[in-house]
Amino acid sequence: MTATASARAPRLLVIAGSARIGSLNRQLAEMAARRAQALGAETTVVDLRALELPVYDEDWAQAHGKPAGARRLRDLFAEHDGLILSSPE
């Protein structure tokens, strides 16, 4: 990038592996998002519960198509430069 080119803030997708309200992983993900914003990044925090993602079943997907939530999550991955993942595993 040249000195005259404007830098775009990195876009980070933030996901907590636990959807439970008050979960430690959700709190850590939100804290990481705030810290990334303070450092100049744009963040999108994803609520996995809101996407209503089923357990992966290729037979079902072949018969019915990919679930809307899975397609939205795929699109979110493509729209962002990086991922922050907080997981209980």
Image (spheres, rainbow, N blue to C red):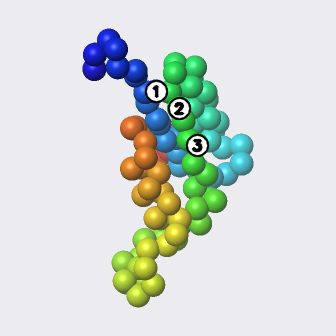
Q: Point out which mark residue 9 bears.
A: 1
The residue tagged 2 is 42
Type of the residue with mark 2: Glu
The residue that appears at 62% across and 35% down in the rendered structure is 30
The picture quadrant where one finds residue 22 is top right
Q: Dot 1, crowdedness within 10 Å: few (<14), some or many (≥20)?
A: few
Circle 3 residue:
45
Residue 40 against residue 3 in the figure, above or below: below
For marks 2 and 1, the one nearer the N-term is 1
- Asked if 89 appears above or below 75 in the picture, the reply is above
Q: What residue sits 71% from the left and 48% below the top?
A: 21
Q: Residues within 10 Å of mark 2 (few under 14, many from 20)?
A: some
Q: Amino acid at mark 3?
A: Val
User: Residue reaching furthest left?
Assistant: 1
Residue 80, image x, y percentages = 43, 42
**Front position among marks 3 and 2:** 2
CB atoms of marks 2 and 1 within 8 Å: yes
Find residue 30 and name its label. none
Q: 10 Å neighbourhood of mark 3: few (<14), some, or many (≥20)?
A: some
Q: Residue furthest bottom?
A: 63
Say if mark 3 contacts mark 1, CB within 8 Å.
no
Describe residue 81's horizontal placement relative to residue 42 as left or right. left
The alpha-carbon separation of the residues under discs 2 and 1 comes to: 6 Å
Q: Amino acid at mark 1?
A: Ala
Q: Earlier in the sequence, mark 3 or mark 1?
A: 1
In the image, 23 versus 80, the foreground residue is: 80
Location of residue 77 in the rendering, given as x and y in whole percent from the top left corner: 42, 49
